[in-house]
Image (cartoon, rainbow, N blue to C red):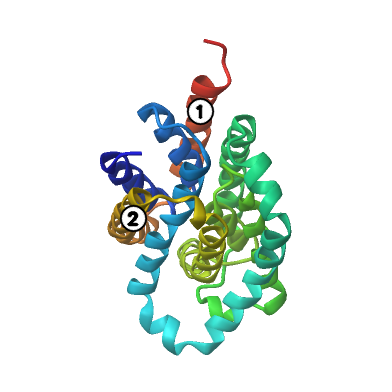
Amino acid sequence: MEIKHALLLGAVEGITEFLPVSSTGHLILTAHVLGIPHDSFTKSFEIAIQLGAILAVAFLYWRRLTRDIELWKRILVAFLPTGLLGFTLYRFIKSYLIGNDLVVVLALVLGGIFLLFADRVCERFCYISDARELSYPRAFAVGLFQSLAMVPGVSRSGATIIGGMLLGLNRKTSAEFSFLLAVPTMLIATSYDLYKSHGEFQATDWQVLGVGFLTAFFFAMLSIKTLLRFLSSYSFLTFGIYRVLVGLVYAYFFLLPK
C-alpha cells in the first residue's frame, strides 16, 4: 500500500466512521477500486486507522469525557456486550467475516432498511434528550445493538444509533451516544488487533498507518460536526436510502459475474 492510498483510505474512514453507512464496507469498496489487495495488512490497516477517528471524538468531547461520571457509567455498561463478544469471537470474525462480500452486501442493504424503520419509529417514541437519563438496562441493550457491528457492513455507528432510537433516544442524542461509546469500544478493539498483528508489519507499514491515522482524525472531526448540524434539521432517511444503494453497488463489483 502506498502513501497516497493511505491518504484516501484515511479520508474515507474519517468521513464514514460516525455516519450510519458502514466505514468497513466503504473501505473495502475503495480498496477494490484502487486495486489494493485485501490481505492481512490491509485488514489491520482498516482497523488501526479507526484510532484516528476515535481521537477526534476524544478531542471534541474531552470536557464531557473527563467530567461526566454519570455518562461514563452508561458508556461502560453499553460497552460490556461488545467487549465480551469481541474478545470471544475475534479470531472467527477476522478469519471468516472480514472480507466476506456477501455478508457485507446483506448487512448494508438490511441495515439501511432497519435504519429507515427506526427513524420512523423515532418520530413518535424518541423522547430522551440526555444520555444520562438512559437506564442501565437500556444502555446495556444499546450495547447489544453495537455488538452486531462485528459483522462487516453493519456499521457500528448505524447499529448503535438504531438501537438508541428504538430505546427512546432522540436522533441527535443517539448519534452523540454512539460517538462516545466508540471511544472505549474502538480503542480496545484496535489496540488488541495491533497487539496481535504488529509483528507482521514492516517499517514502511508503520509510516502508512501513521498517514492513515492522521487523515482519519482530521476528516472524522469534520464528519461529526457536519452530522450533528444535519440532524438539527433532517432525519436519517437519506442515510437509509444511501446504504441500500451502496449495497447494490458493492454487489455489482463483488458478487455479479464479470
| Residue 7 to residue 70: above or below | above
Q: Residues within 10 Å of mark 1 (few under 14, many from 20)?
A: many
| Residue pictured at 56% horizontal, 42% vertical | 153
User: In which quadrant is the N terminus drawn?
Assistant: top left
Q: Which is more foreground, mark 1 or mark 2?
A: 1
255 left or right of 175 in image: right
The image quarter containing residue 124 is bottom right
| Residue 151 to residue 166: above or below | above
Toward the viewer: 163 or 258?
258
| Residue pictured at 58% horizontal, 60% vertical | 165
The mark found on residue 143 in the picture is none
Toward the viewer: 195 or 10?
195
Instruction: Find the distance from the CA under tag 1 to the CA under tag 2.
Output: 23 Å
56 left or right of 161 in image: left
| Amino acid tagged 2 | Ser
**Where is residue 38 shown, x and y percent of the image?**
49, 35
Q: Give the SS element for disc 1.
A: helix
User: Mark 2 and mark 1 in contact (Cβ < 8 Å)?
Assistant: no
**Where is residue 67 shown, x and y percent of the image?**
43, 89
Q: Give the SS element for disc 2.
A: helix
Q: Residues within 10 Å of mark 2 (few under 14, many from 20)?
A: many
Going from the N terminus, do you reach mark 1 or mark 2 first?
Answer: 2
| Residue 80 to residue 196: above or below | below
**Where is residue 65 shown, x and y percent of the image?**
44, 81
**Where is residue 13 shown, x and y percent of the image?**
39, 49
Residue that mark 1 sits on: 250
Q: Disc count in the image? A: 2
247 left or right of 216 in image: right
| Residue 118 visible in rendering | yes
| Amino acid tagged 1 | Tyr
Residue that mark 2 sits on: 223
